[in-house]
Image (cartoon, coloured by chain):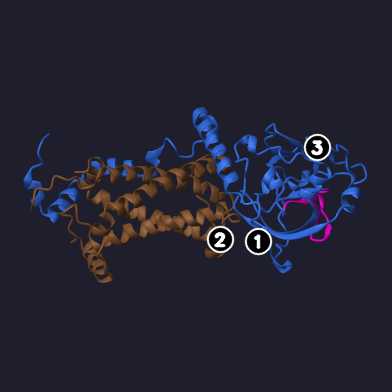
Amino acid sequence: MIKKSPRLAMIDGDTVVKEALRRIEQPSRRLFLQRSLTLGGLSLLTGCAIVDEDSVETALMSISRFNDGVQGWLFDPKQLAPTYPESMITRPFPFNAYYGEDEIRQVDADSYRLEVTGMVADKRAWTLAELQALPQTDQVTRHICVEGWSAIGKWGGVNFASFLSRVGADTSAKYIGFKCADDYYTSIDMATALHPQTLLTLTYDGEPLPPRYGFPMKLRMPTKLGYKNPKHIQAIFVTNTYPGGYWEDQGYNWFGGS
Amino acid sequence: MSDDTRPIHPVWLRVTHWLNALAVVIMTMSGWRIYNAAPFFDFKSAKAMTLGGWLGGAIQWHFAAMWLLAANGLVYLLCNAGSGRLWTKFFPLSPRAIVADLLAALRGHLSHADPREYNAVQRAAYLFVMVDAVLLVLSGLVLWKSVQLPLLRELLGGYEAARRAHFFAMAALVAFAAVHLAMVALVPRTLLTMIRGR
């Protein structure tokens, strides 16, 4: 091993700076420094679309699944989301979907039937009137979108845990899946389904849920991000087979918990 | 001067430094794409400065690299404190010394003769970025788990306040990085010592 020259330890700092500046003076050197120090130099990563690189995509998806496990472990079934006074409701409450406002689905109230299938004792379909006859509760909670923004809204409906109990759902099952009238679909973990603030909602701000907010029914979970809260629900099923979701199948995190 | 054969930067420092650099670049660039999805100021980052392509991709990168940032950061802090290096390299530190060294730097008179010595401005800057990184992680945790982490959420003033805190902590980190890279460019020998240790 070559021993470092003792002369190096006695070099004057000013000389080093002067030397460095002299070298930077040389255009080629300055260009090299500029190039290697700019973000553009990391062109491997800059603005690249994930869907092109298969192995990178696989790695990122498996980390997302790992994060599902972490979130399941972090989830406290007794931890309530904050609630707010009605004066803090965001007006107007934003509309958000994977399509524009001109494509909002109109569901017919009279012919509407909620299908309940899978690992449940009672596979009867429900009419809107039957659902409205169940005990109702409401909440004023913060809706957090995966995009980052949030809005406070008021939803009213049936406590989902009590609904699951009513239909004799097998609560040892892993997933509850949802199919929606706008071809949206998603699924949630059983622990979140049983959370006290998970609500099968029929009203928004005291009025029947308008189409833009998910008529006739939306599952409201203040413990999950917006895309996990399905609107225009047509079918609910209890299963041990991973049902996925509209956004989740495209790469968004499945647990999506806040 | 004594012939000190110890590396200027121990191996654990160099490894954590470069892993951190990688993590910070991924977090910042993916973070900018996430911000663009719902900007709360009157600007968006240019697409070329973002990572992930679309929001789903950016979030995948962000929630992957966060593990690297946190684990590596923790290893760095533990090694730094445990080895005693944190105390000897960064302290004592006085506001007067910082001002004096800052003025000397602006006049081009701040010496880098001994690469083992951090001047007062360096000490302040590196300590600042350690604290800033912790703030980024804590505010990030509130954004991710505002319901599951109520104490932290309230400490930071709620979900929306945490968004701003996260943004400003990021801005401070980026400002630090810009100055840091400029300084390395001025004293290129420091880049070598961060790679080779000597």
Answer above or below: position of B69 versus B109: above
Q: Nearer the viewer, mark 3 or mark 2?
A: 3
Q: CA distance from mark 1 to mark 3?
A: 31 Å
How crowded is the residue under tag 1: few (<14 C-alpha within 10 Å), some, or many (20+)? some
Q: From the viewer's perspective, is B150 left or right of B169?
A: right
Q: CA distance from mark 1 to mark 2?
A: 10 Å
Q: Quadrant of residue A191?
A: top right
Check residue A238 in the rendering and tell me which mark sits there, or answer none: none
Residue that label 3 marks: A120
Q: Chain of mark 3?
A: A
Answer above or below: position of A188 versus B139: above
Q: First in sequence, mark 1 or 3: give its number.
A: 1
For label 3, the SS is loop
Q: Position of residue B31 (x, y in %)?
A: 50, 48
Residue at the (87%, 49%) spot, across then down:
A131
Please check the rendered image and state whether residue A74 is part of the magenta-colored stretch, yes or no.
no
Q: From the viewer's perspective, is B12 left or right of A205?
A: left
**Labels 1 and 2 in the same subunit:** no
Span highlighted in magenta in the image: A198-216
Chain letter matching colour brown: B
Q: From the viewer's perspective, is B103 left or right of A216?
A: left
Check residue A82 in the rendering and tell me which mark sits there, or answer none: 1
Residue at the (58%, 45%) spot, across then down:
A73
Of all residues, the one furthest to the top in this rendering is: A54
Residue that label 2 marks: B153
Chain letter matching colour blue: A
Residue type, label 3: Val
Q: Chain of mark 2?
A: B
Q: Nearer the viewer, mark 1 or mark 3?
A: 3
